[in-house]
Image: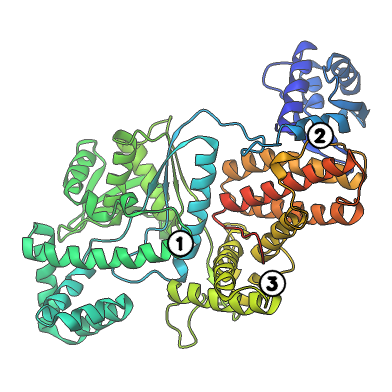
Amino acid sequence: MNIRDFLAEKISRAMSECGAPTGTPAVVKQSGRPEHGQYQANGVMAAAKKMNTNPREFAEQVVSNLQLDDVAERVEIAGPGFINIHVDPAFLSAQLMQFVGDSRLGVDPVPAKTIVVDYSAPNLAKEMHIGHLRGTTIGDSLVRLLEFLGHKVVRANHMGDWGSQFGRLLAYMNRLSNDTESLIAELSDLETFYQAATKLYDEDPQFADLSREFVVKLQSGDPECGKLWQRFIDESIHHCQKIYTDLNITLTPADIKGESFYSDQLAGIVEELAEKDLVTLSEGAKCVFLDEFKGKEDKPLPAIVQNSSGAYPYISTDLAAVKYRTQTIKADRALYFIDARQSLHLRQLFAISRAAGYLTERHDFRHLPFGVIMGDDGKPFQTRSGGVVKLATVLAEAKTRALQLVTAKSPDLAKGERQRIAEVVGIGAVKYAELSKNRSSDYIFNWDAMLSFDGNTAPYLQYAFTRIRSIFRREGIDASTIAGSILIDEIAEQKLAIKLLQFTECIDAVVQECLPNLLCNYLYELAGLFMSFYEACPVLKADEPVKSSRLLLCSISAETLRKGLELLGIETVEKM
């Protein structure tokens, strides 16, 4: 149960019964000393103002109409008309008992909507690099959360698998096609392959001409060119899928809807825009000018949907994707996890889509921008030589560093077990370092900070989980067989109970704001409160029924940590 929303509904109903105008709901938040279960309701003064009555007197009327039997220990009026509610510990106990054996931990499914989540979207001409980490991990965590709530989620991996850069790649493949071993060797490193093809393109005019010919062949459907293209795409997808598997990302090849998927629809998109009088010819290019987009000196800013050579820029493909998502998939919402530098592009995309009728009032399409990963020097994270940091290299180093830490911490574990733990800890550390930061902020990539067992990190939370599980393992207790009720007597128990019951509030907030860092902060606070509870309240040495009560609190805490990390896409282990 979401206590905050539950209380808000009760107070809103009481306000309505006291004559409050429609549209003045109560807003409830925690206040005072959270460990005492105190919530404060606002909205009473706004309603009183509309009714032209004394706020405190109106608050007294509302309190007299509140139906909070067995919920509130006491209700007080504070200041000019705030209502303070002190939740009864017995109510907390009853609510927590509903978590026992409940894999959803009190989170009720919501009415399902069809939601497209557009994330990751690597350029298949190159290997995935550090810049893909943010959109991939944030997008996947929201996918998990939305599906947990019961929505129908369509994963959309809008891969860059089309465009002029493929001309040089295919021309280079064609040059190597008679030497199978060389081709296989060079394709094993896509970044090097891309650099070699680009160097040849820049230095050899004949190769550059051939590359342009391959672009024309590819776009006109030449079968031999298509075979070369498909081989390169398959190899690139293989590289990406290995990264997704290592990162525990739920994207699969079936989720790919690359730029090529929409290539045969682009001419029709431009025709439809022209039919709606949205297209203007400017210097040979077909453009859309909308009044809300102005450039320097207040000049109209064009969105080019077909350039003077007849080619279609990215926005044409994205318009086709919007149309496909609303008219074919029937999406209610779409979340675009794309970096902040594409903000203008996305704003133009949605504006043109609305003007063309692809987006209507019932559609909620949003750009969820994110910042840049920085190095210690405050510049975008790069290799020492200034090159791009491959994501595969980052993940391999994360596992190596984590293995060193796990070996130092638990040298008695078998080598295979240490390696498995290191994979979970290393990958979890990289993902959590990303997810625990506000999406819109830049952050500094720091190995020591993300792999620390202290502070708001994945290793700290994973270790907190294993410590709780060790309580049951050491004593040979099966958590699912614990009988009895939860008793909330001590302050540390009450603090922990309140935090556990806020899991639903947290999930709601994360999904509403699309900010996974809110869940990270919640889990970190929960882990801290559990440690305080465990130090203040003996568990195994307590007498019954207190022992069983505290074991139940331990079990729910462990499951909440596990479920929360799972929704972030981070695994847990039983030992560390």
Residue 188 or 322: which is nearer the viewer?
A: 188
Q: Amino acid at mark 2?
A: Gly
Residue 93 or 249: which is nearer the viewer?
A: 93
Which quadrant would the N terminus be assigned to in this image? top right
Q: Which residue is mark 1?
A: 341
Q: Which residue is mark 3?
A: 452
With 454 as the anchor, is 547 left or right in this view?
Answer: right
Q: Which residue is mark 2?
A: 484
Picture disc at residue 232: none
Q: Amino acid at mark 1?
A: Arg
Residue 430 or 4: which is nearer the viewer?
A: 430
Mark 2 vs mark 3: in front: 2
Residue extending farthest front: 476
Q: Residue at x 85, y 19 (%)?
A: 69
The answer to which image quadrant residue 207 occupies is: bottom left
Q: Amino acid at mark 3?
A: Ser
User: Label 2, label 3: how many angstroms apart (C-alpha)?
Assistant: 38 Å
User: Label 1, label 3: how many angstroms apart (C-alpha)?
Assistant: 31 Å
Q: Residue at x 83, y 35 (%)?
A: 39
